[in-house]
Amino acid sequence: MEINFNSEHVVVVTGGTRGIGLALVKDILDSGASVAVISRKSTGLLDTVFCDCDSKRLFLYDCDIGNYHDVEKTFHKIENDAGMISGLINNAGVNPSRNTIINTNLEDWEQTISVNLSGTFYCSKFAIQSMKKCGKGVIITISSIAGITAMEKRASYSASKAGVIGLMRSIAADYSSKKIRAYCICPAYIETSLTKPYLESLDEQEYNILLGKHRLGSLGETSDISNLALFLLSEYSKWLTGVVIPVDGGYSV
């Protein structure tokens, strides 16, 4: 199955400069679409992180997605620069606190909710306004297995990732009649530069326990997420919406 888009197909990816987000951006560009990348710091990345990409179809924007007015301005810029938005991948996320609820401080809680949940709300809100003009659209939110199953010491992160699942289903219910589809992808542990420090902090026994929770016997790769995202962005998934898809090697079974 080959998935190809034209350059008029504009997909916004938040947190698209590293890890899963970077893989999403590069694979979507390879499919022929135009991509608008939203990150906190994108200055100079065209010559470094994205040096091997088609810069004519790549647009970079500095934006704090936890700031409503910043998001509003950025989405207006994207429409002016790239055109109407037909796809959004809410990928940006933070996890500053690996703690129980008692040990989670207020600053970490507020940051997690601001970026992971409010940021997804803000970006989806303005993307939908653009998609309605297009007559269709797709919103993919990268949630987590922490949003669908209990994990120890993830109080704020789990709450935020469960919240985006509820938001996604609400979007699907409200906008299916406008041909706007919504999905959540829930990864388990993916090997990226972001997870590397945590994985390397585990001793051999701890790592093997973590690995054993993935019943297929391995951690995930970024391509496991981007391949599914391409399918969901395409017309191959045109009769599918409002679903939560674990991509977790069997972790949540």
Image: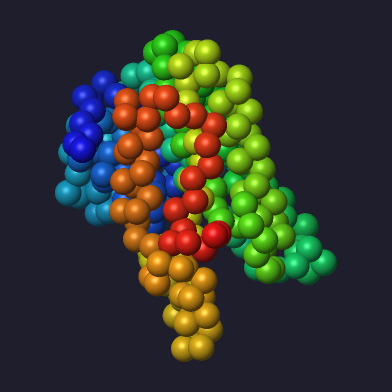
Query: How many numbered marks does the figure carry?
Result: 0
For residue 197, above or below residue 243: below
Question: Which residue is painted at 27% across and 30% down in the image?
Answer: 34
In the image, taking residue 253 as reference, residue 137 lies left or right, namely left
Colour convention of the picture: rainbow
**Residue 249: where, in percent of width, then height?**
43, 62
Question: Which residue is painted at 63% across and 28% down in the image?
Answer: 170
Within the image, what quadrant is residue 101 found in? bottom right
Whether residue 79 is visible: no
Question: Which residue is painted at 49% across and 51% down in the image?
Answer: 246
In the image, taking residue 170 as reference, residue 199 lies left or right, namely left
Farthest residue to the right: give it: 102
Question: Which residue is painted at 48% across and 76% down in the image?
Answer: 212
**Residue 62: where, in percent of width, then height?**
44, 40
For residue 127, above or below residue 177: below
**Residue 236: where, in percent of width, then height?**
32, 29
For residue 228, above or below residue 79: below
Whether residue 29 is visible: yes
The C terminus lies in quadrant: bottom right
Q: Nearer the viewer, residue 85 or 51?
A: 85
